[in-house]
């Protein structure tokens, strides 16, 4: 392998262009050398219609970053690992929980890294919140995660298809933070899922979660928000309230702002990816994905008005 990790992005949509490209550029020991996408192509890099053509005809690469819809990632990751490439998976890492286990085994057999990324965990206030809560008894958690789907996912019809997660595509970000800042595992107890009459994935959801000690966790996810998004995790503790705001950019302790920083989540992801590939280790935490899957299993479905993008 070269001194730089030579990376190809597969799926060159909004998230790849806005987040992955600049993050790779900021990461020492990493270089973006090619893109595979059936439609979108950068002006300054070799472009291929799909992963297979990239592997067959493209430049030498060490790793792929899979930024395609989750319904496509299992097959692409399996192909890349069979070609002995390291694999970075955008979130959510797949359309189902079960499909990840064979990929973990394939990465181990190929002696390559499989990295299931949870970018919101790398927001600047998340680790300080984890450390703060470690010394306190948390008595209640409320998650409010709402945004306008037309603003944040314009034209992305796949998100409302089966396996596209619907409102859980952003909602899983909150769950990835929750499972990081709490020390005890949580599990789903109840869920209400709101499905537009013309779509196969929910546009809104309310969840009731808990840990083994009975900690109540209430989560509200909604794609129908108008105006600015609400990305908040509010924790009540015996020592007063602790609030993670703006998607993990701000942390308040008892109303006092103690963290307020710019988000540099994706550069942090790539630094982690570089470190993992150097050690031939994988990092695949399925806890957030399991909570989503269990919410679908437990969820009561309610049909609401059709959604037109």
Image: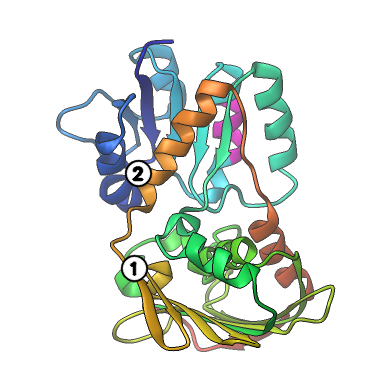
Tell me if residue 309 can be seen.
no
Residue toward you, 279 or 8: 279
Instruction: Report the disc number at residue 152.
Output: 1
Residue 212, how many percent across, how many down? 84, 73
Q: Is residue 278 above or below residue 302?
A: above
Nearest to N terminus: mark 2 or mark 1: 1
Tell me if residue 73 can be seen.
yes
Residue 154, how many percent across, how many down? 32, 66
The quarter in which the C terminus is drawn is bottom left
Q: Is residue 200 above or below residue 113?
A: below
Residue 2, how many percent across, how many down? 38, 11
Identify which residue is drawn at 15% across, 32% down: 43
Q: Is residue 188 above or below residue 306?
A: above
Residue toward you, 199 or 72: 72
Colour logic = rainbow
Magenta segment's dominant SS is helix
Identify which residue is drawn at 60% across, 48% down: 94
- Magenta-span inclusion, residue 76: yes
Q: Which residues are magenta?
A: 74-79
Considering the numbered disc 1 on the image, is that residue within a helix, a strand or a loop? helix
The quarter in which the N terminus is drawn is top left
Which residue in the rendered view is the most extreme toward the left?
43
Query: Decide: marks 2, 1 in contact (CB < 8 A)?
Result: no
Disc 2 versus disc 1: distance between alpha carbons?
21 Å
Provide the residue designation for mark 2. 267
């Amino acid at each position: 392998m070269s001194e730089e990790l030579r990376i190809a992005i597969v799926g060159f949509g909004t998230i790849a262009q806005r987040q992955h490209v600049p993050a790779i550029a900021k990461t020492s020991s990493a270089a973006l050398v090619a893109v595979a996408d059936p439609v979108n192509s950068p002006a300054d890099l070799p472009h291929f219609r799909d992963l297979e053509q990239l592997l067959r005809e493209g430049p030498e690469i060490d790793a792929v970053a899979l930024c395609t819809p989750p319904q496509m990632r299992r097959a692409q990751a399996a192909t890349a690992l069979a070609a002995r490439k390291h694999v970075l998976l955008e979130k959510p890492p797949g359309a189902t929980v079960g499909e990840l286990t064979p990929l973990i085994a394939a990465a181990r057999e190929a002696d390559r890294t499989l990295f299931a990324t949870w970018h919101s965990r790398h927001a600047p206030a998340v680790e300080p919140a984890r450390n703060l809560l470690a010394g306190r008894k948390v008595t209640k958690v409320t998650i409010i995660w709402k945004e306008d789907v037309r603003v944040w996912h314009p034209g992305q019809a796949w998100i409302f298809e089966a396996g596209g997660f619907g409102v859980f595509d952003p909602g899983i970000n909150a769950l990835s933070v929750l499972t990081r800042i709490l020390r005890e595992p949580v599990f789903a107890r109840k869920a209400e899922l709101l499905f537009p009459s013309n779509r196969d994935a929910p546009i809104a959801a309310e969840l009731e979660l808990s840990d083994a000690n009975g900690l109540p966790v209430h989560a509200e996810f909604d794609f129908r928000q108008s105006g600015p998004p609400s990305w908040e995790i509010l924790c009540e503790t015996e020592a007063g309230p602790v609030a993670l705001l703006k998607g993990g950019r701000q942390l308040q302790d008892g109303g006092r702002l103690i963290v307020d920083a710019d988000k540099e989540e994706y550069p942090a992801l790539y630094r982690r990816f570089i470190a993992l590939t150097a050690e031939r280790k994988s990092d695949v935490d399925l806890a957030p994905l399991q909570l989503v899957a269990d919410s679908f299993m437990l969820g009561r479905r309610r049909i609401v008005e059709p959604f037109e993008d």
